[in-house]
Amino acid sequence: MNRMIATVIFTLIAAPVFAEADLEAGEQAFARQCSTCHVVVDGEGTTLAGKNAKTGPNLYGLIGRNAGSVEGFRYGKSLVAAGESGLVWDESLIAAYIQDPKAFLAEYLDDSKARSNMAFKVRKEEDATNLAAFLATFGAVTN
């Protein structure tokens, strides 16, 4: 229950920030920081962003998707556990996660031993906000 309350509070606090997101800057940040590991490919197989990267999961339809749930991708145990306990991605949660995946999962799961397979951290909060807004343009999933 505490996780749900914290998620709602964080989302409400962060909401005004996303109104200021710069999609072009998000696209540039994706190309610089994310495309080495991630790609955005729609259901018809068209690459919308990134290269032919396969280290990380396809980020198409990320918003509204349960964490750790892309079919055929091997996620770390902590991310799968977060998804199974109700973590559904939205822009504010994506922005928080990509700034420090390990710390995000440790807090969300209330488990200091939680780990993320994503070792990369987006250093600037502005980049994280712009990236999350950019990724939100690629469809949303309803669970």
Image (spheres, grey):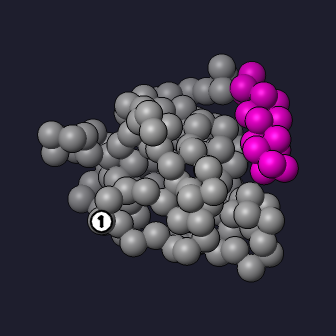
Residue 125 picture location, percent across and down:
71, 44
Residue pointed to by mark 1: 72
Q: Is 25 colored magenta in this rendering?
A: no
Q: Would you say the magenta stretch is mainly helix, strand or loop? A: helix
Dot 1, crowdedness within 10 Å: few (<14), some or many (≥20)?
A: few
Residue most toward the bottom? 113
Q: For residue 140, what is the image quadrant? A: top left
Residue 66 visible somewhere in the drawing: yes
Residue 39 picture location, percent across and down:
33, 52
Residue most toward the front? 1
Q: For residue 143, what is the image quadrant? A: top left
- The residue type indicated by label 1 comes to Gly
Residue 135 visible somewhere in the drawing: no
Compared across the picture, whether 82 is left or right of 113 comes to: left
Residue at figure coordinates x 47%, y 44% from the top left: 65
Q: Is residue 124 above or below residue 68?
A: above
| Closest to the observer, 31 or 139 | 139
Residue at figure coordinates x 56%, y 56% from the top left: 83
Q: Is 12 colored magenta in this rendering?
A: yes
Q: For residue 10, what is the image quadrant? A: top right
| Closest to the observer, 6 or 46 | 6
Compared across the picture, whether 41 is left or right of 61 comes to: left
Residue 99 picture location, percent across and down:
67, 55
What range is drawn magenta here? 1-17
Residue at figure coordinates x 72%, y 26% from the top left: 15
Q: Is residue 3 above or below residue 53?
A: above
Task: Tell me the SS state at disc 1.
Answer: loop
Compared across the picture, whether 52 is left or right of 28 comes to: left
Residue at figure coordinates x 30%, y 65% from the top left: 72
| Closest to the observer, 58 or 20 | 58
Residue 44 picture location, percent across and down:
15, 40
Compared across the picture, whether 55 is left or right of 89 comes to: left
